[in-house]
Image (tube, rainbow, N blue to C red):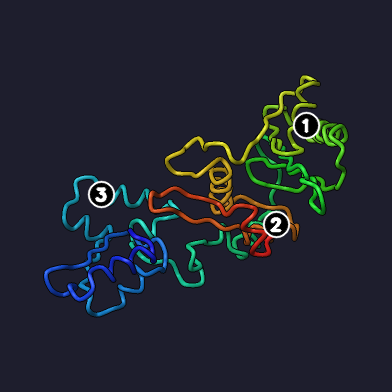
Amino acid sequence: LVDDLTYATVKRMLGDAIGGDSCLVEISNPWRRNHFFKIGQYPEYHKIFINWKTAIEENHPTLTPEFVQEMRRESLFGILYDCKFPDEDVMDEAGWSSLLTLGDVEAAKVRGRDVRSFGTRRLGFDVSAGGTCWNVWTLRDDLLLSILRKDHDKSTMGACGRTVSLMEENEVQPIHVNIDKTGVGVGVVHRCWEQKIGVNGFIAGENADNKERFFNRRAECYWRFREWILKGGALSDDSEWDVLSEIKWKIHSDKVIQIMSKEEMRKDGIT
């Protein structure tokens, strides 16, 4: 599907020929409410609408009712199978949508009031980039995600020591510890390694495990987190989680999912 600028250029090139010997054909899933959505409202365009129901009625060789039922669990079912454009208040003009709504976050916090720790415990550490940013340690098991600690300490030694203490207090094994290994975080990870503590270094910009679906590891992990929350994952009753409703994602025409970069988020006033 061409973008708005290319569409306008093609239309100028065709000019008065549209309606004569030439025509303009566009085929797409309804990814966003752009010009493709707009021209669908014009009566001079002939529309052919094919969703999963039509495909089954026409005996599509691989699309079965059982397969469709399985795909209903996918977050993009409405776009890819129902062929419905996202609601206007869900997606902006650039194609960005909220990773989670504030309602999703509030519901997860309500669940967190009653849930008890269960399953493997995992520790995450987002190392401060300086300025007003915080060092943040989180703890997650199979059911609940909590904020363990926040501070402004810029000492690599101190950050490593507190990480080890939190591991011991919460009985977390090094294999289940993930530390942001960019910028200052590199020093924290290496200090742990020097002490023979085999934590994992996380680099958000690295390739995702599933490169055909995700732009990078950051997108892949955020998306897995989203699915965990929507399937019943719980959050501690902490107002800090409300920022999750400001995280944005979009999908490209090649179906690769991308999360808005920190730089773009800051431009939009999201810290």
**Which image quadrant for residue 265?**
bottom right
Q: Earlier in the sequence, mark 2 or mark 3?
A: 3
Residue nearer the viewer, 244 or 146: 244
Mark linked to residue 64 = 3
Q: Which residue is mark 1?
A: 187
Q: Is residue 138 above or below residue 186?
A: below
Marks 2 and 1, how far apart in space? 27 Å
Q: Earlier in the sequence, mark 1 or mark 3?
A: 3
The residue sitting at 19% across, 46% down in the picture is 61
| SS state under label 1 | helix
Identity, as a three-letter code, of the amino acid under mark 1: Gly
Coordinates of residue 16 in the picture (x, y in percent) = 20, 76
**Which image quadrant for residue 57?**
bottom left
The residue sitting at 33% across, 57% down in the picture is 81
How many neighbours does mark 1 have within 10 angstroms: few (below 14), some (14-19), or many (20 or more)? Answer: some
In screen coordinates, is 243 left or right of 97? Answer: right
Q: Which residue is mark 2?
A: 241
